[in-house]
Amino acid sequence: MKKVLREALINKRSSLSKEKAALKSRQIFTELRATTLYKEAERVMLYIAFRNEVHTEEIIDDLLQRGKRVFIPITVHSTKAIIVSELKNPIEDLQPGNFGVLEPKPEAVREVDPSLLDLVLVPGVGFDKKGYRIGYGAGYYDRFLPRLSPDTPTVGLAYQLQLVDELPIDQYDYPLQYIITEEGIRDNRGLYGIGSDIE
Ligand SMILES: Nc1ncnc2c1ncn2[C@@H]1O[C@H](COP(=O)(O)OP(=O)(O)O)[C@@H](O)[C@H]1O
Ligand SMILES: [Mg+2]
């Protein structure tokens, strides 16, 4: 069930042209950037986009320009764990790792405890209206999200076409607090629409 849905959602996401993905990613960032949550966050974890995930290069540049600290995940294949590493220089620090995803070079790994983060932006293959997500099938974020401090906000970044009414979930699936798409911000109670604020 999950597997079929995962493949269908991956196909749907790959059907977005480069231009559309770039445009929607920019709209999603505009939404995010206007929130109090984003403006007040000082230590932000996000991902380096892979395949057609919502792009994050501009977010990273914006955060660094504002003097905020940026963190990215390193996936540990053997344990399916995520290590959080500080990213200081996106040009110098990164190289292709597992599956071709950009990860820090060994000398640029700067591990921190996840409880230090005050905002976490999460990629996904699909999301539902309660904030549940489906990933590539290894459960990395299901293992990671419970390690955050309970008051750390978690925000999924997704194109509207990745959003479904309800995903099948199992005991380890862990919901996100907010999802931002090009059509607005939603929490697990509903859609706030474009230009909404979240704190
Ligand atoms: N915290 C956890 N401890 C042990 N196994 C887990 C944990 N989180 C997820 N898993 C397992 O990882 C596998 C993949 O999870 P799944 O939710 O299907 O993938 P994804 O979240 O990437 O879509 C499942 O077999 C799931 O039971
Ligand atoms: Mg899962």
Image (tube, helix red, strand yellow):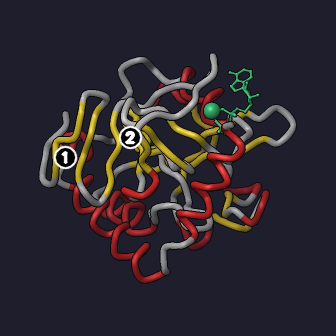
- Badge 1 amino acid: Thr
Which quadrant would residue 189 be assigned to in this image? Answer: top left
For residue 194, above or below residue 129? below
Answer yes or no: do the residues labelled 1 and 2 have beta carbons within 8 Å? Answer: no
30 to the left or right of 88: left
Helix, strand or loop at mark 1: loop
Placement of the C terminus among the 4 image quadrants? top left
Q: Mark 1 vs ligand 1: CB under 8 Å? A: no
Mark number displayed over residue 35: 1
Q: Which residue is mark 2?
A: 155
Q: Earlier in the sequence, mark 1 or mark 2?
A: 1
Name the quadrant where ligand 1 sits: top right
- Front residue of 22 and 33: 22
User: Residue 26, image x and y in percent?
Assistant: 32, 69
For residue 124, above or below residue 25? above
Residue that protrudes farthest toward the right in the picture: 78
- Characterize the local packing of mark 2: few (<14), some (14-19) or many (20 or more) Cα atoms within 10 angstroms: many
For residue 55, above or below residue 116? below
User: Residue 23, image x and y in percent?
Assistant: 34, 75
Residue that protrudes farthest toward the bottom in the picture: 19
84 to the left or right of 106: left
20 to the left or right of 134: left
- The residue at 22%/41% (across/down) is 191
Placement of the N terminus among the 4 image quadrants? top right
Mark number displayed over residue 118: none
- Badge 2 amino acid: Val
- The residue at 36%/30% (across/down) is 177
- Front residue of 101 and 125: 125
